[in-house]
């Protein structure tokens, strides 16, 4: 179909070809239901519709849709993925766009022209307005006037739709990206969780001095930048809240003591903290004020659920409700009127925003993010300021469900909060990680540098075709492959793609990017979507040339596998999967800290190894044909359960600083990741003018 009618129906959508506007076909046509495609997606969809049921190579799309020198394979993949998202297409069972492996794409849906009056709202005419039947030779026919009226109404509706969209887009001025970072603190060590008082005269934040394991509060006068360190030492501290002009409320854990809520006077002169209520865990951002009361989340004693507590000053807390459906401990929450917002880690790789009407509403999903969000705060009444892991700061509009990046300057910032036209944040200075190679059967382990640069190195995947890893040495995270003394860059990723896992499968390197699985051939930088995708991906494993993965489906974890190019459920309640010995699988269950072996017949065998998946990160342990290896909480030792010996061994790591990740070399402990000493500062993010 080289010629397209002005309005066509494609699947569940009406599409206005000239303006790139989509309306759901199943609902009444209203301006608020209209979706307007951005220019590149508009051109791409038109080109697909002009060539239905035709294999279109990526090179063809680059040549016909993208301007010269701007089109790339990655750009095509991103645009096709974005168009699928708008249309609601499923790459595993496509209705609109099919991916032909290593060849290109094909448009599938029927394209049917739509009569001019179909998209108009239905208009009921009163009986007196109904045209009388008359003979043609007595009165001229009146139907042309009705047609003209309806056509005029259509034009008015179209203009109103365009005006509505423009008004929505321009109701608030476009945000001017910040261009300046001004330090507030310049102390040795690390500072975290800055909070400004209402008068904006003082900021309070945590400090961890160099070579220290304890934290203390610093109070800084913003007039003369004088810092007053408070003497009290803590093992852990939460974000502070200003109670009034003089006092703060926070959660802390002193050496040798359990978790407590404290009230502490800071102005005009600091005083000792006063304990208020006991707690189980020091959660960083899980305390809000609601209706003159304090509301907070806390872990239960067994760490399997969380409880929402409420208390007034000078009164004991009361249990408001329990949260049992959110698997990872919720550590961040905000409030707006009577609506509580929860930042939830849904899987090992992704976060979701939930909201809950107080006091007894059910938690509902607002937005699922395909990557991890580390912290959030309010930008204004309808927008959130997000701090994603390994990403730039973002603004998320709850009302419109749209996001906007605050620019590459904000990539090293976190714990950000807006005050007027400035953002107060924590900045990581020269944070880098190195990869070391190990000889595991010596004790202590012999450690030698393997991938060391002035940028971060992480995520090792060892296989027969080589050892792949992730490095920021090219500016942003890219996939690299070791080749003798040299390493070659395999990928060409952008800033919005968060690398979450690498693994080898059947000679191909697989990469999990923003919770989607891609294939990357070792001899090419071209990425292609893997045919099977998880709805909410957990961990992947390639065991005996069979691909397994975990995913969340309707508040339940499942172990899945690929069978005849389809996703096949294997077992419910599995949150992580690794390879075990003799074609067995090693499973981490959602309701049990013990690791289990899954026998070929389906039986489960418990092992004398306990790892709490809620707190042990996926990169802090692995299994291979020699055994199970995991980092201790201090990061200075690796414990191993060897299959042949069936007992636990301990390997000491001769490192000054703790390790944060370990990986296999195919037959035991082969690689570890260690951060270099680094500082963090408290900074202002703002515009020069």
Image (cartoon, rainbow, N blue to C red):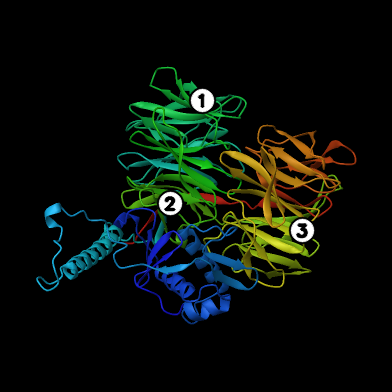
Q: Is residue 417 left or right of residue 605?
A: left
Q: Nearer the viewer, residue 589 or 569?
A: 569
Q: Is residue 668 above or below residue 597?
A: below
Picture coordinates of residue 226, whole percent (x, y): 40, 44
Marks 2 and 1, the one that precedes in the sequence: 1
Q: Residue at x 75, y 36 (%)?
A: 595
Whole-number angstrom distance, CA of label 1 to CA of label 3 = 45 Å
Residue 66, visible in the rendered structure: no
The number of numbered badges drawn on the structure is 3
Does label 1 or label 3 sit earlier along the sequence? 1
Q: Could you classify mark 3 by the number of other residues whose Cα lies within 10 Å: few (under 14), some (14-19), or many (20 or more)?
A: many
N-terminal of the two: label 3 or label 2? 3
Residue 260: image tag: 1
Provide residue 362's location: percent of width, then percent of height.
45, 33
Instruction: Specify whether 222 is left or right of 518.
Output: left
User: Could you tell me residue 148's position as x and y percent?
Assistant: 19, 69
Q: CA distance from mark 2 to mark 1?
A: 29 Å
* Secondary structure type for disc 3: strand
Toward which corner of the image does residue 227 lie, by quadrant?
top left
Q: Quadrant of residue 599?
A: top right
Secondary structure of the residue carrying tag 1 is strand
Which sits in the foreground, 290 or 88? 88
How packed mark 2 is, by other alpha carbons closer than 10 Å (few <14, some 14-19, many 20 or more), is many
In the picture, the disc for residue 44 is none
Callout 1: few (<14), some (14-19), or many (20+) C-alpha neighbours within 10 Å? Answer: many
543 with respect to 272 (left or right): right
In the rendered image, which residue does mark 3 sit on? 462
User: Between marks 3 and 2, how big is the CA–CA gap?
Assistant: 40 Å
Task: Give the residue displayed 66% in from the left and 32% down from the top.
Answer: 591
Residue, disc 2: 683
The C terminus lies in which quarter of the figure?
bottom left
Q: Is residue 477 visible?
A: yes
């Amino acid at each position: 179909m080289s010629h397209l009618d002005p309005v066509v129906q494609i699947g569940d959508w009406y599409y206005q070809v000239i303006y790139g506007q989509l309306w759901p076909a199943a609902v009444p046509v209203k301006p608020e239901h209209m979706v307007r495609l951005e220019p590149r997606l508009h051109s791409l969809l038109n080109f697909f519709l002009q060539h239905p049921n035709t294999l279109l190579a990526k090179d063809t799309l680059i040549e016909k849709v993208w301007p010269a020198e701007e089109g790339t394979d990655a750009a095509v993949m991103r645009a096709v993925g974005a168009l699928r998202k708008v249309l609601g297409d499923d790459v595993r069972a496509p209705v609109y766009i099919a991916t032909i492996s290593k060849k290109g794409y094909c448009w599938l849906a029927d394209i049917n022209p739509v009569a001019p009056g179909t998209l108009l709202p239905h208009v009921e005419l009163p009986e007196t307005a109904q045209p009388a039947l008359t003979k043609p030779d007595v009165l001229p026919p009146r139907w042309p006037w009705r047609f003209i009226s309806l056509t005029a109404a259509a034009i008015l509706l179209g203009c109103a739709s365009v005006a509505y969209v423009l008004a929505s887009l321009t109701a608030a001025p476009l945000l001017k990206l910040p261009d300046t970072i001004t330090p507030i603190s310049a102390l040795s060590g690390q500072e975290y969780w800055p909070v400004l008082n209402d008068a904006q005269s003082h900021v309070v934040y945590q400090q961890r001095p160099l070579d220290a394991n304890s934290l203390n509060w610093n109070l800084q006068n913003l007039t003369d930048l004088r810092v007053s360190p408070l003497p009290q030492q803590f093992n852990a501290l939460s974000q502070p809240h200003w109670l009034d002009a003089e006092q703060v409320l926070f959660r802390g854990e002193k050496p040798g003591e359990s978790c407590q809520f404290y009230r502490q006077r800071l102005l005009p002169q600091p005083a000792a903290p006063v304990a208020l209520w006991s707690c189980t865990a020091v959660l960083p951002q899980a305390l809000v004020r609601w209706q003159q009361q304090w509301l907070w989340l806390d872990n239960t004693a067994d760490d399997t659920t969380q409880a929402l507590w409420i208390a007034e000053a000078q009164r004991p807390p009361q249990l408001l409700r329990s949260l049992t459906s959110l698997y990872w401990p919720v550590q961040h929450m905000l409030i707006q009127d009577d609506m509580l917002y929860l930042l939830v880690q849904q899987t090992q790789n992704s976060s979701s925003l939930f909201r809950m009407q107080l006091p007894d509403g059910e938690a509902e999903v607002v937005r699922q993010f395909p990557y991890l969000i580390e912290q959030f705060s309010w930008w204004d009444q309808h927008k959130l300021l997000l701090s994603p892991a390994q990403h730039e700061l973002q603004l998320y509009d709850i009302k419109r469900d749209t996001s906007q990046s605050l620019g590459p300057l904000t990539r090293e910032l976190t714990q950000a909060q807006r005050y007027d036209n400035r953002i107060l944040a924590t900045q990581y200075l020269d944070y880098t990680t190195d990869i070391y190679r190990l000889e595991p059967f010596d004790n202590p382990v012999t450690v030698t540098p393997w991938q060391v640069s002035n940028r971060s190195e992480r995520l090792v995947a060892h296989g027969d075709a080589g050892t792949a890893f992730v490095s920021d040495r090219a500016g942003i995270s890219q996939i690299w492959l070791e080749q003798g003394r040299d390493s070659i860059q395999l990928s060409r990723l952008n800033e919005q793609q968060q690398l979450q896992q690498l693994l080898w499968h059947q000679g191909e390197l697989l990469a999990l990017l923003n919770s989607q699985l891609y294939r990357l051939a070792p001899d090419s930088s071209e990425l292609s979507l893997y045919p099977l995708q998880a709805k909410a991906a957990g961990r992947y494993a390639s065991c005996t040339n069979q691909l397994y993965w975990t995913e969340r489906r309707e508040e339940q974890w499942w172990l899945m596998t690929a069978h005849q190019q389809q996703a096949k459920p294997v077992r419910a309640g599995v949150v992580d999967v690794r390879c075990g010995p003799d074609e067995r699988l090693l499973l981490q269950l959602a309701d049990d800290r013990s690791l289990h072996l899954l026998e070929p017949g389906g039986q489960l065998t418990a092992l004398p190894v306990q790892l709490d998946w809620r707190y042990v990160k996926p990169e802090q342990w692995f299994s291979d044909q020699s055994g199970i290896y995991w980092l201790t909480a201090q990061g200075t030792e690796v414990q191993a359960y060897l299959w042949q010996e069936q007992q636990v061994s301990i390997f000491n790591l001769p490192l000054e600083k703790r390790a944060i990740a370990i990986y296999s070399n195919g037959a035991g402990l082969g690689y570890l990741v260690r951060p270099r000493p680094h500082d963090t500062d408290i900074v202002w993010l703002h515009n020069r003018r």
